[in-house]
Image (cartoon, rainbow, N blue to C red):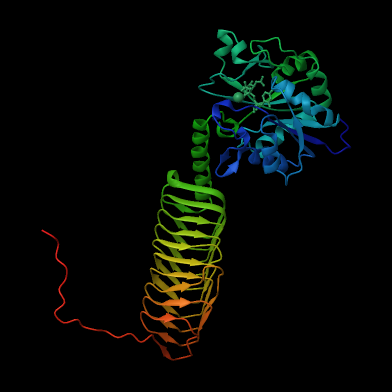
């Protein structure tokens, strides 16, 4: 390689396997880890490494896979028949630059880290065949790394082709490797399917490299997690738990208090300030942000939301696409639907649903309410059971509540309607006309007493 030229990196991701053991019509690499398709993680890693081109070798369900990743710049390579990893890589080679370094990744090995891959790429840039290997206590049916007396790698033997003594070797081939494109191209023409599985093994290039005097160098993966492939729902579930644990530990290292890392799930990104606390069984999805000293009680679900300093979210609350100000109190059992905005110091209590509404500073809806399509001012009290009737059966309408309004219990606000600043609405009122400033608005209802009325008795 000419060192005056910048290195070209071509990443080939193998993803053509049928995934029979998933028992699914969905292509294996679209099965999700923490709500993101496995192939998405591998593409992220390839992009973080600044790959010049990313080739994805696909087989079954290609259209589904292409649709899912249409926003990425990918050279899609179809492998119509799965004749082995060597054959799969060969399908991508016609579009690979001869002066490039080729990095081989797998669509069903999602947690591979760029930090592990870049030394492999660097070695390949210096004309080595670089393999990612790891020693396992239970190497199972993975390919074994064969070394000579000088400890140099001389071959990789597939488990099915291995002798008993080779099977006792604990160092295995992860499958991830980096190599010069020109060497790879030439070796791929020399491999055959003369083996137990009748497949073209990519791993056979190791022997060819040794024959050609190309040094074969291994890098040890730090953790089993990042080299673990998924072949079944059982393996996917195990990897999910391991991944979640690792995520929880990383967040804890960065200062988040998680009461029990084994009962924490993040399916996205979480930013947080000092002294935040997350209780058990909380699920956080999408991009979420917590300010300082935010407290999240047990069994909450928070999606795509921002929560500011000193706010408490109590148990069993569900918060989605919402923005919550500082010093608020939400729940238990609150539901904030998309478009909810709570200003500083507001309180949303149990069995209260808010949708597409702004609740002003220090305003409260503490019990059993529905607030939809409403603009609520500051210092408003919404009594128990107050609801906005925002839907007339065809269209949605707005409710506007000014500052310092007091709405009594069990009121219906029939939108479109406005309640002016300082107004008071008597309990049980159906507000269907605008309520004026500083006045008491009530529906007149009379209370009768039916003398001598008898309560029905249970039949004997
Ligand atoms: C492969 C390695 C083995 C290694 C193991 C790690 C070979 C010959 N063996 O074995 O040394 O220990 O991975 O998991 O490379 N694929 C295609 N097209 C094909 C065949 C496979 O795209 O024709 C893809 C599969 O989707 C899968 C990956 O390549 O993602 C590995 O294929 P698989 O058949 O599972 O290889 P292993 O036998 O596990
Ligand atoms: Ca495999």
Q: Horizontal placement of 191 versus 269: left or right?
A: right
Image position, residue 398 (x, y; %): 55, 75
Judging depth in this view, the residue of 186 and 387 nearest the camera is 387
Q: Is residue 341 visible?
A: yes
Image position, residue 253 (x, y; %): 52, 49
Q: How many marks?
A: 0
Q: Is residue 141 above or below residue 17?
A: above
Judging depth in this view, the residue of 292 and 387 nearest the camera is 387
Residue at (43, 43) in percent of width and height = 262
Q: Is residue 373 above or below residue 194?
A: below
Q: Horizontal placement of 214 versus 4: left or right?
A: left
Which quadrant is home to the C terminus? bottom left
Residue at (46, 88) in percent of width and height = 422
Image position, residue 212 (x, y; %): 81, 15
Q: Picture quarter containing residue 83?
A: top right
Residue at (50, 38) in percent of width and height = 242
Q: Is residue 216 above or below residue 437?
A: above
Image position, residue 15 (x, y; %): 67, 31
Q: Is residue 128 visible?
A: no
Which corner quadrant of the figure contains ligand 1? Answer: top right
Judging depth in this view, the residue of 213 and 46 nearest the camera is 46
Q: Picture quarter containing residue 322?
A: bottom right
Which quadrant is home to the N terminus? top right
Judging depth in this view, the residue of 447 and 399 nearest the camera is 447
Q: Name the outermost residue toward the left.
A: 460
């Amino acid at each position: 390689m000419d060192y005056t030229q910048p290195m070209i990196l071509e990443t080939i991701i193998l993803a053509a396997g049928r995934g029979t053991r998933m028992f699914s019509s969905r292509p294996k690499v679209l099965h999700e880890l923490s709500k993101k398709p496995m192939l998405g993680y591998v593409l992220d890693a390839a992009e973080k490494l600044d790959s010049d081109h990313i080739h994805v070798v696909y087989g079954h369900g290609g259209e589904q896979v292409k649709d899912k990743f249409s926003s990425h710049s990918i050279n899609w390579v179809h492998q119509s028949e799965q004749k082995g990893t060597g054959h799969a890589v060969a399908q991508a080679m016609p579009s690979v630059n001869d002066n490039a370094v080729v990095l081989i990744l797998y669509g069903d090995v999602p947690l591979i880290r760029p930090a592990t891959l870049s030394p492999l790429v660097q070695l390949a840039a210096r004309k080595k065949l670089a393999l990612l290997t790891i020693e396992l206590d239970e190497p199972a049916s993975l390919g074994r790394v064969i070394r000579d007396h000088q400890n140099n790698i001389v071959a990789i033997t597939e488990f099915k082709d291995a002798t008993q003594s080779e099977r006792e070797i604990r160092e295995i081939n992860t499958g991830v490797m980096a190599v010069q494109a020109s060497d790879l191209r030439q070796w791929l023409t020399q491999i055959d399917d003369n083996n137990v599985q009748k497949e073209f093994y990519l791993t056979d290039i190791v022997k060819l490299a040794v024959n050609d005097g190309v040094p074969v160098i291994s890098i040890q993966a730090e953790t089993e997690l990042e080299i673990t492939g998924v072949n079944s729902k059982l393996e996917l579930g195990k990897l999910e738990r391991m991944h979640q644990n690792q995520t929880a530990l990383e967040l804890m290292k960065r200062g988040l208090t998680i009461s029990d890392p084994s009962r924490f799930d993040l399916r996205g990104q979480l930013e947080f300030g000092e002294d935040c606390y997350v209780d058990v069984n909380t699920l956080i999805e999408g991009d979420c942000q917590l300010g300082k000293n935010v407290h999240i009680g047990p069994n909450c679900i928070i999606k795509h939301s921002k929560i500011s300093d000193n706010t408490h979210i109590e148990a069993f609350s569900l918060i989605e696409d919402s923005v919550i100000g500082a010093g608020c109190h939400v729940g238990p059992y609150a539901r904030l639907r998309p478009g909810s905005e709570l200003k500083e110091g507001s309180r949303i209590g149990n069995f209260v649903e808010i949708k597409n509404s702004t609740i002003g500073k220090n305003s409260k809806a503490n019990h059993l309410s529905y607030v939809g399509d409403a603009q609520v001012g500051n210092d408003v009290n919404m009594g128990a059971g107050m609801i906005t009737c925002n839907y007339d059966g065809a269209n949605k309408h707005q409710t506007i509540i000014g500052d310092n309004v007091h709405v009594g219990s069990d009121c219906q606000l029939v939108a479109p309607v406005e309640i002016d600043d300082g107004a008071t609405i008597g309990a049980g009122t159906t507000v269907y006309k605008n309520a004026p400033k500083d006045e008491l608005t009530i529906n007149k209802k009379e209370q009768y007493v039916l003398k001598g009325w008898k309560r029905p008795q249970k039949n004997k």
